[in-house]
Image (cartoon, rainbow, N blue to C red):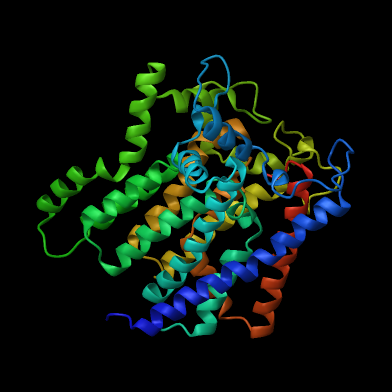
Amino acid sequence: MKDTRSQWVDDLLAGFAAYYLTTVPVLLGLLFGIEFLHSPTGASLARADPIAVCFKSDAVHYLGISRDGYSYDPAESSVVTYCPAYPLLGRWIGQVTGLPLGEAALLLANCAFLGACMLLARYVRARWPEATPEQRALVLAVFGLWPLGLLFRMPWTESMFVCGTLAVLYGMARGWPLTVLALLTGLVTAVRPVGVALTVAFVWHALTQPGFHVPAKALHSIRLAPLACWGLLAYMGYQWLAFDTPWAFVLAQEHQTFLAPEDRSWPAKLQSLTTLEPIWGVYMPSCRRYWGAAGGANGPLFNLYFWNPILFVLSGVLLLVGGLKRWLTGSELILGVSLLAIPYLTRSFEMSMSSHGRFAAVVVVNYLVIGRLLTYLPRQAAVAFCAALALFLCLLTSLYVAGYMVF
């Protein structure tokens, strides 16, 4: 059934309201961090530039790519591990608007998150048509207030990634042409390599389309698969021409490790991944991966090395619930599982689940599951849950801008 113009307007306004209201805790956290916190080195942040403090860790590398382009050194970690869509688009925005590159990158991230909120409002209506306006608002609130979603407003790729992912998911729900969906999916693979998870979900969607025989659908899916990862393929082609290896972005990650075991042979890695040791090892004081070794002087509450495995497993549980309840389609389940499996199989052993909490935050289908689960609670409990998320989002932002390693 075609949506009315009023429904479109309602959803776009709901998305804007979600972006605006859920960004307030981030702004408060940013101001609190500048005014009252000191950096880990003890330096005061008073009168610090509010835009400059948003550039930490990966954001600094993306800004460097926008300014200086790519470089690759096989002997050390290189910025070639970062895909080009976000830094290049940020550079173009800066050239068109005349803004400094930092401001352009921050503007891009927030515009992408605003678009993601609007797309999520449309997606929830398409996938949960019987939901009340209050229930749809609850999904948007959880999405906007999720503490690791702090990066959706920072100059990282998360917001652009979820915006592109939601565009494809909405297109699937509305029956857009497969060629259009393939082109959008390919664009997402140019934002982050894990975008190939969306390629896998797209192929499943194409294979399950009605009206064609299985061999014909399989052949059509094979033809569209390269188009559905054109962004990553194009980036690989660039690396081949510039650095003589299309796999430079993979090879450079070998130098990125965190509390990893000394034995990094393939048999040791296979045994570790099979026994889920990267997950439970974080909580074993005798293990090299122990969260306290990452700086646990302030306890576990605001230590994301403690929370990363928990958030990662929680994301998997939510997918399981969504599948058992039939709240999620096959393509959505495949997308969610792939978004978790790819970083676990490729980086959890070397990185001791570092950043896996933010990897789980981009599994956007889970926000629909959380929203449905919250409908089983009294209204006051759901509001209290959202308030708790807002508090943690605010405090996490303060720690981030102060320079603490929170991811």
Residue 105 falls left or right of residue 398: left
Residue 54: x, y in percent? 68, 46
Q: Quadrant of the C terminus?
A: top right
> Where is residue 191 shown, x and y percent of the image?
44, 43
Quarter of the figure with the N terminus: bottom left
Residue at image position (46%, 27%) is 250
State whether residue 395 appears in this view: no
* Residue 108 in view (yes/no): yes
Q: Residue at x 11, y 50 (%)?
A: 215
The residue depicted at 47 percent of the width and 62 percent of the height is: 115
Residue nearer the viewer, 199 or 186: 186
> Residue 364 location in percent, x, y?
48, 60
Residue found farthest to the front? 98
Q: Is residue 325 left or right of residue 2?
A: right
Question: Foreground residue, 312 or 245?
Answer: 245
Looking at the image, which is closer to me, 137 or 301? Answer: 137
75 and 311: which is toward the camera? 75
Q: Work out whether 23 lies above or below 264.
A: below
Residue 48, above or below 67: below
